[in-house]
Image (cartoon, grey):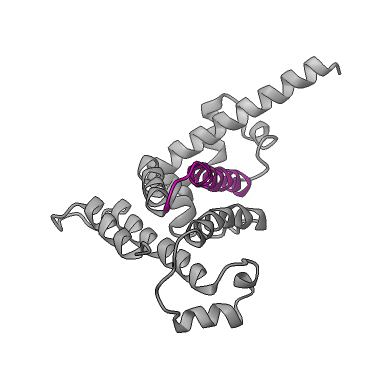
Amino acid sequence: MTPSRTGSRERYRAQVREEVKQHAWEQIATAGVSALSLNAIAKLVGMSGPALYSYFASRDDLITELIRDAYRSLADTLRAKFDAGADISVLAYAVRDWALHDPQRYFLIYGTPTPGYQAPDDTTAISSEIMSVLIEAFAAQPSPTPATPFDTHLETHSGWAAGHPVPPRTLHQALSFWTRLHGVLSLELAGHFAGMEFDPALLFAAELETLLPH
């Protein structure tokens, strides 16, 4: 097969895979990830179920690709912001904007785990890039607050902490930032603030203020 024909086939395959993923996101937005169906998507792209399996070996294979894409999108967004000089506050709002832009993508990686699905290790590696950016951001800031028992725990018991050459206090700050902002975002996106008559954006800002180095 000539290089041009090989290139054309590869481009076609990539286009089909992207079309399948787009239909998958639409299914997830309508009925949730548990309702994801390769056979239904095959009809939408005009091919048989068995033919579609040559592009994605299984439903879990498709979910994995969606998860990788979601993590990669957020990791690249934060890395680009930080490398351009963004501070912690800007990174926080970048996460919020990313989540609000596509809540289903957010919930796929930070919501309830999909029953029966086990993500491969490489997805964890991509998600770790996100935390690495936050650790770098906090490492660049002053840390005047005293150490806590959890900081000591990180220093003496955490193999994860051993892989990051920064003070345990910095790791603790990054973790607190990540968990508390996700708490607000998850509740907001799931509609749990409905009827409380306050602006979730202001709550997000207030929580962020308590997490910033002073």
Location of residue 118 (image quadrant): bottom right
> Magenta stretch mostly in which secondary structure?
helix
The x and y percentages for residue 25 are 47, 39
Please tell me whether residue 204 is drawn above or below residue 72 in the rendered image. Answer: below
Q: Horizontal and vertical percent for residue 99?
A: 39, 46
Residue at the image position 41 percent from the left and 54 percent from the top:
88
Q: Nearer the viewer, residue 148 or 103?
A: 148
Look at the image and give the residue range highlighted in magenta.
59-87
Q: What is the quadrant of residue 127 in the picture?
A: bottom right
Q: In the rendered structure, does residue 150 fall within the stretch colored magenta?
A: no
Measuring 34% from the left and 55% from the top, which residue is drawn there? 185
Q: Is residue 166 visible?
A: yes
Q: Position of residue 142 (x, y in %)?
A: 44, 65
Quadrant, the C terminus: bottom left
Assign the N terminus to one quadrant of the image. top right
Return the x and y of residue 211 as percentages of the image width and height: 35, 64
Q: Residue at x 55, y 26 (%)?
A: 45
